[in-house]
Image (cartoon, grey):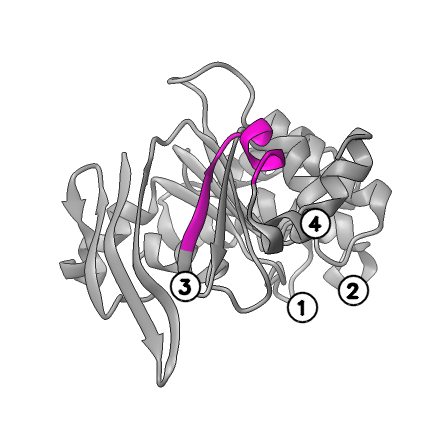
Amino acid sequence: MIEFKNVMLSYGDHVVLDRVCFRCAFHEKIAVLGGSGGGKTTILKLMLGLVKPDSGQILVDDQDITVMSESELRDVRMKFSIVFQEGALFDSMNVKENVAFSLREFTKSTEEEIDKRVRDLLKILKIEDAIDLMPEELSGGMQRRVAIARSLAACEPRMMLYDEATTGLDPLTADNICNLVNELSRGEPPGRVGFIIVTHKVTDAAKVAERYIFIRNGNIIFDGNIEELKKTKDTLLRKFINELYISHGSA
């Protein structure tokens, strides 16, 4: 279980999160929606202890990670696998070396074991033919797949975290990434690996999520399923999710 209790965070005079409260299980499939700069990515960083709140608690399996040291946070972070929007691949390393990086840094695996793990992941993600390519030789969609492979390499996460996984991709490639997100979270709760995907692309969120959290002005103004979201009376939220009404042929 993950729980935010009255979490507050500001950068100067800008309030990013204002007494935010929510809880979720590791097996849930959640989309966090909101406008640019609304604190969506910050929630992921807070969950990993990469950013500390000004006040409030963040509990992961009933442990308050806001008071943990970096060494203590390492065990917490191994419960998650995160893919940031920019992918952050190493330009000087090919696909194999990028995926193998965390295995070499954080495990005692042999080179033979590393090679097998990398090839297995690339096969699962359907990019095994790209193993020797450099990042600049990859399409945007392939770069996202490599980033996902690298995030999975050194751990078996209980939850995936995606930061704007489909932003900047053409519709077909974005749809393929959505299919991949669903594939990696297949199965039934409570045994499946869940995810939190932060995005401003509502139609992509609708392809993968079962629960929707909307953030505005540092506050959670909606938390529910797709049918509840489509019935919202909040005027600004209805404008934000207008694509849903168009794609589903209803208003």
Query: Do residues under tags 4 and 3 come within 8 Å of each other at their CB atoms?
Result: no
Quarter holding the N terminus is top left
Classify mark 1: residues with Cα within 10 Å, few (<14), some (14-19) or many (20+). few
Mark pair 3, 2: CA separation: 37 Å
Mark 1: secondary structure: loop
Write down the residue under mark 2.
136
Q: Where residue 232 sits in the image (x, y, percent)? A: 56, 39
Q: Is residue 237 above or below residue 8?
A: above
Is 239 displayed left or right of 153 in the figure?
right
Instruction: Magenta stretch: give its range.
Output: 220-232
Is 185 displayed left or right of 177 in the figure?
left
Write down the residue under mark 3.
218
Mark pair 2, 4: CA separation: 18 Å
Residue drawn at (82%, 30%) of the image:
249
Mark 3: secondary structure: loop
Is 7 displayed left or right of 155 in the figure?
left
Query: Closer to the N terminus: mark 1 or mark 3?
Result: 1
Camera-side mark, 3 or 2: 3
Is 161 displayed left or right of 48 in the figure?
right
Mark 2: secondary structure: helix
State the residue in front, 43 or 110.
43
Classify mark 3: residues with Cα within 10 Å, few (<14), some (14-19) or many (20+). many
Q: Where residue 69 sits in the image (x, y, percent)? A: 17, 62
Write down the residue under mark 1.
91
Write down the residue under mark 4.
166
Q: Where residue 156 sits in the image (x, y, percent)? A: 41, 33
Mark 4: secondary structure: loop
Q: Quadrant of residue 36?
A: bottom right
